[in-house]
């Protein structure tokens, strides 16, 4: 089964719809935040309003605790 991207950008007229769906609870890991940031950059570059949508029923469970509980260097890393 092919893996789908956790962040998908769809453009319609002047709106960029950014869908977040990691297949679980959309915990904000460094990778998910980076992908979301990239999608927002594209929307901004194309002068689109951005609409961020999560999984049915919720946007995100919050920040990924495994990152917070990891070593200090990785928890503070920005990419």
Image: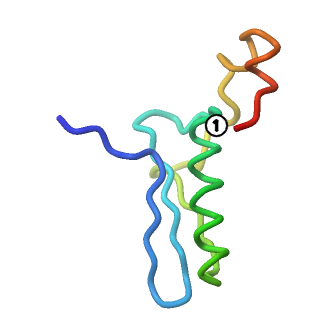
Q: Residue furthest left?
A: 1
Q: Which residue is at a point 52% across and 53% down the rendered structure image?
A: 54
Place residue 69 in its image quadrant: top right
- Total marks shown come to 1
- Quarter of the picture containing the N terminus is top left
Place residue 46 in its image quadrant: bottom right
- Quarter of the picture containing the C terminus is top right
Q: Which residue is at a point 58% across and 36% down the rendered structure image?
A: 31
Tell which of 8 and 23 is nearer to you: 8
- What colour scheme has been applied to the protein in the rendered image? rainbow
Q: Is residue 73 left or right of residue 22?
A: right
Tell which of 7 and 65 is nearer to you: 7
Vertical arrangement, residue 72 with respect to residue 10, above or below: above
Q: Residues within 10 Å of mark 1 (few under 14, many from 20)?
A: some
Q: Is residue 11 left or right of residue 50?
A: left
Q: Is residue 78 left or right of residue 8?
A: right
Q: Which residue is at a point 45% across and 78% down the rendered structure image?
A: 11
Percent position of residue 2, x then y: 21, 39
Place residue 8 in its image quadrant: bottom left
Tell which of 38 and 50 is nearer to you: 38
Q: Residue furthest bottom?
A: 13
Q: Secondary structure at mark 1?
A: loop
Q: Which residue is at a point 29% across and 38% down the rendered structure image?
A: 3
Percent position of residue 26, x then y: 54, 39
Vertical arrangement, residue 69 with respect to residue 19, above or below: above
Vertical arrangement, residue 75 with respect to residue 12, above or below: above
Vertical arrangement, residue 52 with respect to residue 30, above or below: below
Percent position of residue 33, x then y: 64, 43
Q: Is residue 22 left or right of residue 58?
A: left
Q: Which residue is mark 1?
A: 28
Percent position of residue 28, x then y: 64, 37
């Amino acid at each position: 089964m092919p893996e789908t991207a956790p962040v998908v950008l769809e453009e319609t007229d002047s709106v960029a719809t950014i869908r977040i769906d990691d297949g679980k609870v959309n915990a904000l890991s460094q990778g998910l935040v980076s992908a979301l940031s990239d999608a927002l950059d594209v929307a901004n570059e194309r002068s689109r309003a951005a609409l961020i949508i999560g999984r049915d029923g919720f946007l995100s469970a919050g920040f990924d605790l495994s990152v917070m509980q990891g070593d200090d260097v990785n928890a503070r890393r920005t990419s």
